[in-house]
Image (spheres, rainbow, N blue to C red):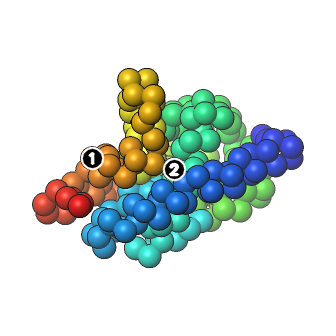
Amino acid sequence: MQSSREASVEGEGHEFLHSVINPIIDKLNKKLTNRQKEQIVQMASGKLKQHYGQDTGNYYSLLNESFIRTYLNIFEKGKKPITFKDFKEKIFKNVPNEERFQEILIREQELKQRFDALEISSLKELSRKSKSYFNTYEKDELGRAVFKIYGDYSKERLKNHNLVFENFIIDNFFKYIPNKIPDRDGSMRHLGKPWISH
């Protein structure tokens, strides 16, 4: 659990990154079609959409936050996008018994809202519905795409020290977004022709 000082430092870093990321997203925004905006929303995690909304009009905030949070997770916390296996291990590590589960529900209201939406009220039910919960709230295809963007930029920067992050994003962003939307049940919904942005 974070201390108040750690939370404050992270919050300051988050706000600073807005000054870096926002102008890039503003330029990227001019190239996005409505169909692309829909896909960005669809790819974002349910947990992020709980904060910023799930309508197509919320794509800007979701994309912005995904870039910022992914950066903080990589460089500040050393984290990678969570897998279902990671999620299951996290559950059993942090929630060893029913008493602990109920304590968390009392303290974490947003988490309780997510559990209520899937009718999860006990540790046993969470274990049984863990895949459904992961797909609905934790699975983050947008975060994975952004994670790969940061990784590839870092590799290219080693080859070309003059490479500007903003230019790399504007030139390559659409290569990292698939031509299919992953539905929450795991099936794929085609969007037609691949994106071509000029």
Q: Residue at x 13, y 60 (%)?
A: 193
The kind of residue on which mark 2 rests is Phe
Please state if 137 lies on the left or on the right of 3 as rendered: left
Residue in front for this viewpoint, 78 or 132: 78
Q: Which residue is mark 2?
A: 67
Task: Name the residue carrying label 1.
Answer: 175
> The N terminus lies in which quarter of the figure?
top right
Residue 162 percent coordinates (x, y): 44, 33
Callout 1 amino acid: Lys
Crowding near the residue tagged with mark 2, few <14, some 14–19, many ≥20 C-alpha atoms within 10 Å: many
Could you tell whether 60 is left or right of 109 in the image? Answer: left
| Residue 18 higher or lower than 124, as above or below | below
Above or below residue 57? Residue 39 is: above
Q: Quadrant of residue 116?
A: bottom right
Which residue does the image show at 39% across and 60% down from the upper left?
Answer: 28
Q: Where residue 19 sits: x, y (%)? A: 63, 56
